[in-house]
Image (cartoon, grey):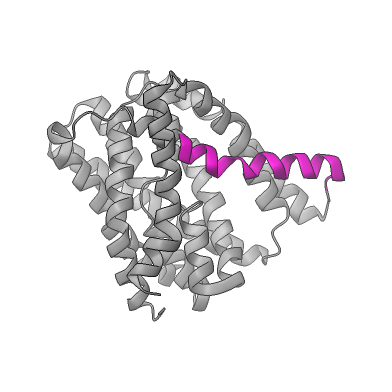
């Protein structure tokens, strides 16, 4: 896979949608908060329920991938927290700094990239990785987005107010129990899930349209992007060895861990009144820089 192929087939479609949304946002008074609410409470839970309930992977392999996701998120979160303490960020900036360092764009970017690199087997494993990253986003991500203005107790309670955790548990129960949803329900859930990724890209465009200047935050933005693109995959290399992942499962897990900051961070920022400009800036910078970092990583993994 060449740099040009990645740029043309994966990054360019993403930026076309984001750019269109930003352009429309500058001309029309669009409500990003309402769209963010739909993403968090409707589209993302439907995507998780559909992806987990229909997954054909072995439960043991799902468990290994899940362990890597949570372990990488935990280690990177600790490193990001240490950075905020060392540099004495205020509470609001510290919260979004940690959030943008751990939330991974493993869906609209990671899924097609893994398909190009590893084929259908790669997509199946990347879907599990993506679903588990949405669990991180809707638990730790919600807590961090809320923490900027809410109390610790209120931020913790917000985690249980979003439906994704319940969608995950239901999906696992259906999968392991061999239960198939009634056709009308399954089709409705599938259609709602398909809306998640394009709506996230539109949300990113709406947030980027509000970015006025990066100069006052360029240092934190670059640091958060570096944690996401460079440090996280290095942590993933160790975690895949620790949990015994091999072959294509190992490669997919490392590649997914190296994805740029998730678009859903912008939705969370809008929903919980966090620093939307900073989150959008990190998404923009990390996505642009990932063209280089992911190309290097894929070459190191022997994909070409």
Q: Camera-side residue: 151 or 19?
A: 19
Residue depicted at x 47% and y 64%: 113
Q: Residue 18: where, in percent of width, then height? A: 41, 41
Residue depicted at x 12% and y 37%: 87
199 in magenta = yes
Q: Quadrant of the C terminus?
A: bottom left
Image: 233 above or below 151 = below
Q: Tell whether 239 sits left or right of 134.
A: left
Farthest front residue? 27
Q: How many marks?
A: 0
60 in magenta = no
Q: Tell whether 171 sits left or right of 93.
A: right
Q: Residue 76: where, in percent of width, then height? A: 32, 50
- Tell me if residue 64 can be seen: yes
Q: Residue 15: where, in percent of width, then height? A: 39, 47
Image: 296 above or below 286 = below
Q: Tell whether 126 sits left or right of 300.
A: right
Q: Quadrant of the N terminus?
A: bottom left
Q: Residue 64's quadrant in the figure?
A: bottom right
Q: Tell whether 103 sits left or right of 218.
A: right
Main SS class of the magenta portion in the image = helix
Q: Camera-side residue: 240 or 293?
A: 293
Which stretch did the figure color magenta?
Answer: 181-202
- Tell me if residue 165 can be seen: no
Residue depicted at x 75% and y 54%: 175
Q: Residue 217: where, in percent of width, then height? A: 17, 35
Q: Camera-side residue: 205 or 62?
A: 205
């Amino acid at each position: 896979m060449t740099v040009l192929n990645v740029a043309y087939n994966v990054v360019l479609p993403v930026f076309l949608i984001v750019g269109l949304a930003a352009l429309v946002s500058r001309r029309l008074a669009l409500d990003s908060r309402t769209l963010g609410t739909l993403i968090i409470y409707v589209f993302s839970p439907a995507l998780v329920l559909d992806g987990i309930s229909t997954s054909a992977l072995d439960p043991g392999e799902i468990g290994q991938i899940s362990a890597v996701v949570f372990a990488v998120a935990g280690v990177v979160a600790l490193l990001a927290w240490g950075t905020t303490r060392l540099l004495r960020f205020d509470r609001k900036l510290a919260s979004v700094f940690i959030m943008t360092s751990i939330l991974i764009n493993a869906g609209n970017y990671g899924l097609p990239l893994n398909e190009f690199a590893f084929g259908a087997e790669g997509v199946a494993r990347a879907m599990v990785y993506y679903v588990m990253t949405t669990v991180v986003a809707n638990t730790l991500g919600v807590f961090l987005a809320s923490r900027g203005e809410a109390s610790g107790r209120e931020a913790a309670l917000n985690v249980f107010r979003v439906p994704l955790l319940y969608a995950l548990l239901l999906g696992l129960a259906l999968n392991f129990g061999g239960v198939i949803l009634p056709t009308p329900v399954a089709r409705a859930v599938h259609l709602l899930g398909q809306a998640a990724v394009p709506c996230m890209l539109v949300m990113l465009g709406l947030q980027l349209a509000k970015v006025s200047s990066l100069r006052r935050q360029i240092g934190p933005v670059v640091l958060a992007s570096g944690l996401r693109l460079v440090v996280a995959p290095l942590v993933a290399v160790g975690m895949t060895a620790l949990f015994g992942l091999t072959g294509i499962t190992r490669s997919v897990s490392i590649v997914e861990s190296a994805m740029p900051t998730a678009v859903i961070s912008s939705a969370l920022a809008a929903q919980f009144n966090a620093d939307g400009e900073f989150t959008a800036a990190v998404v923009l910078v990390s996505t642009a820089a990932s063209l280089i970092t992911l190309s290097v990583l894929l070459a190191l993994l022997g994909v070409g």
